[in-house]
Amino acid sequence: MTEFVERLALGDRVGAVARTRELLDEGFSRADVRELIARAQHEVGRLWQSNTWTVAQEHIATGISESVLLAVGTSGDAAGDRGHVLVVCADGEWHLLPARLLAEELDDAGFRVTFAGGSMPAEHLVGTVRQLGPDVVAVSCTLSLNLAGAARTVAAVHAAGRPVLVGGAAFGTDQQRAAAVGADAWASDVAAATAIVERWVEEPPEREPPTRRDRAEADRLYREEARLVEDAYHRLSARFPDLSRYSEWQVDRTREDLAYHLRYLASAALVGDDGVYLEMLPWLRELLTSRGVGARAVDVTVEVLREVAAAESLPETQRILARA
């Protein structure tokens, strides 16, 4: 893996593709190559998180990994005949590589796979599913702030009368969040997803009644995000007058950060899992510390958002922020 990451660091697409082709010639399987790419991407994420790599380096590396996957990831044989799977990213989700890795795994397993790319708009998905007629739709979601988009995607697939399987880091380590967004099943990794697809192609699952939760507060957080961000920003400005000297870019980034907090909170309320928000905070503290920003910035943001939640009578949000 080290050699592969070094090629990513150099932006060496040709070398990365050549090396993985050599691995195939040496007897490694395409699944082995996919595992190499997945492990390398985890390392790329760690390097960005620790501020060792820039966003540009991370984007270049991800682009090369996708090129490698396309170059060596498929057999080139005729389309599989074991069934048809549509692989999509949840509405709002732009992390394509996990979904692409699943698509290649399913291709190797003999399925006909249609890969729909990033952020499939839910309003267009119903017609697409009806037109293509897949046996199964697999939905990938990496960031838990996009769980509302995942819920919209799942609803669209069901409206088209097809079963839906979900997976990705956004869904955590068990099926709770998947059930909350209405999915028929959750897979912990590509092997588990492939096994579920194999069963469903032979015998489609019976549709279970979706988990019903009170979505009023989550819906309000999504619907009124812009106004809540402005309230939080003004409260933050009152605590830190230096914000008045921020550039337009800095102001926009501060508002954007506040919006991200609110989306994580909305997702937590949507699926009934405080961990959606609470698990993000250590990651954010580490990210900011690596960039010379004190972790206290996170604590102050939480305090300001608690004030907003109290003023707006958002009890679930207040409770989560109190735990934070």
Image: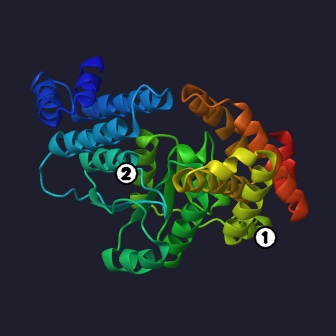
Q: Residue at x 51, y 67 (%)?
A: 153
Q: Decide which of 147, 282 is in the foreground and name it.
A: 282
Measure how far apart labels 1 and 2 are at the Cα level: 31 Å
Q: Position of residue 117 (x, y in %)?
A: 34, 60
- Residue 150 x/y as whole percent: 55, 61
Q: Secondary structure at mark 2?
A: loop
Q: Earlier in the sequence, mark 1 or mark 2?
A: 2
Q: Toward the viewer: 296 or 271? A: 296
Q: Seen in the image, is 297 located left or right of residue 56?
A: right
Return the residue nearer the eye: 35 or 257. Answer: 257
List the residue tagged with mark 2: 96
Of all residues shown, which one is farthest toward the front? 245
Answer above or below: position of 18 versus 201: above
Q: Amino acid type of disc 2?
A: Leu
- Tell me what residue is drawn at x 39 percent, y 34 percent: 54
Residue that label 1 marks: 216
Q: Could you say whether the residue bearing mark 1 is in a helix, strand or loop?
A: helix
- Percent position (x, y) of residue 221? 73, 65
Residue drawn at x 39%, y 74% as measured from the top left: 129
